Image (spheres, rainbow, N blue to C red):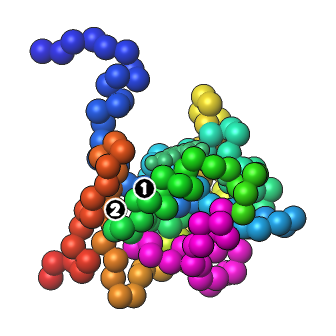
């Protein structure tokens, strides 16, 4: 049996979900990043990832402008960084600097990779699809990275967070 409820009420209970940091270069200033939960794999060959970014996001504007971004899967212990980086905009502050985020350049050297993440994917923007108050950005993965030593993925249970996977896969 089901009870009909507003969509927002049903969606509020859909957790857990993976969280990623989307990073983007900025031709006129510091690179930026934001946490996003609405991210998925959308092709295996070529490997592609899609992420829904709200219209007002500074990160979305940078991805549109540069045609490049990186998806960094959040790692265990990054819950504080998720909260803090998801409540301010890079339009107003240099988040990487203010939040003292360590980064690595990646292979292609455009969007930075965020230290402490479990895995990271450098992407070239291939499509942008309108989706209500968000746009879906589809990127082709041009370089993939995993943390060394391994880091457990983090999952969001709707405001509280947990390590989701063993640091190393079962053999
Ligand atoms: C746990 C969490 C998940 C979020 N998921 C998304 C998302 O999937 N898409 C989105 O556009 N914003 C999402 N946000 C909101 C953005 O991260 C937030 O608006 C951020 O400040 C935007 O930063 P920017 O303006 O520097 O790009 C999320 C925030 C949090 C805390």
Residue 7 as seen in the image, left or right of residue 68: left
Q: Reply yes or no: does residue 68 show up in magenta.
A: no
Confirm or reject: label 1 Cβ below 8 Å from ligand 1.
yes
Q: Residues within 10 Å of mark 2 (few under 14, many from 20)?
A: many
Q: Which mark is residue 120?
A: none
Residue 154 pos. (x, y %): 34, 62
Residue 61 pos. (x, y %): 75, 50
Residue 115 as seen in the image, left or right of residue 135: left
To which residue does mark 2 refer? 154
Decide: is 11 above or below 40: above
Residue at 62%, 31% (x, y): give it. 133
Q: Residues within 10 Å of mark 1 (few under 14, many from 20)?
A: many
Question: Is residue 170 in view?
Answer: yes
Q: Main secondary structure of the magenta part?
A: loop
Decide: is 122 above or below 164: below
Q: Quadrant of the N terminus?
A: top left
Residue 150 pos. (x, y %): 33, 82
Residue at 60%, 28% (x, y): give it. 132
Residue at 39%, 87% (x, y): give it. 148
Q: In which quarter of the view is residue 18 placed?
A: bottom left
Number of marks present in the image shown: 2
Labelled pair 2, 1 in contact (Cβ < 8 Å): yes
- Of 155 and 46, the residue lying toward us: 155
Q: Which mark is residue 19?
A: 1
Segment tinted magenta in the rendering: 95-119
Q: Residue furthest top?
A: 4
Confirm or reject: label 2 Cβ below 8 Å from ligand 1.
no
SS under mark 2: strand
């Amino acid at each position: 049996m089901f009870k009909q409820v507003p969509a927002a009420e049903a969606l509020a209970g859909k957790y857990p979900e993976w969280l990623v940091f989307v990073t983007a270069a900025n031709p006129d200033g510091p690179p930026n990043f934001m946490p996003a939960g609405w991210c998925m794999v959308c092709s295996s060959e070529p490997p592609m990832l899609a992420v829904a970014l709200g219209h007002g996001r500074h990160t979305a504007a940078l991805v549109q402008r540069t045609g490049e971004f990186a998806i960094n899967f959040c790692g265990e212990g990054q819950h504080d960084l998720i909260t803090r980086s998801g409540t301010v905009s890079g339009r107003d502050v240099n988040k990487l600097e203010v939040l003292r985020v360590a980064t690595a350049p990646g292979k292609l050297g455009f969007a930075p990779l965020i230290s402490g993440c479990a895995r990271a994917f450098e992407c070239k923007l291939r499509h942008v699809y309108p989706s209500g108050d968000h746009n879906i950005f589809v990127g082709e993965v041009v370089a993939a990275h995993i943390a060394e030593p391994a880091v457990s993925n983090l999952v969001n249970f709707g405001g509280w967070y947990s390590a989701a996977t063993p640091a190393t896969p079962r053999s």
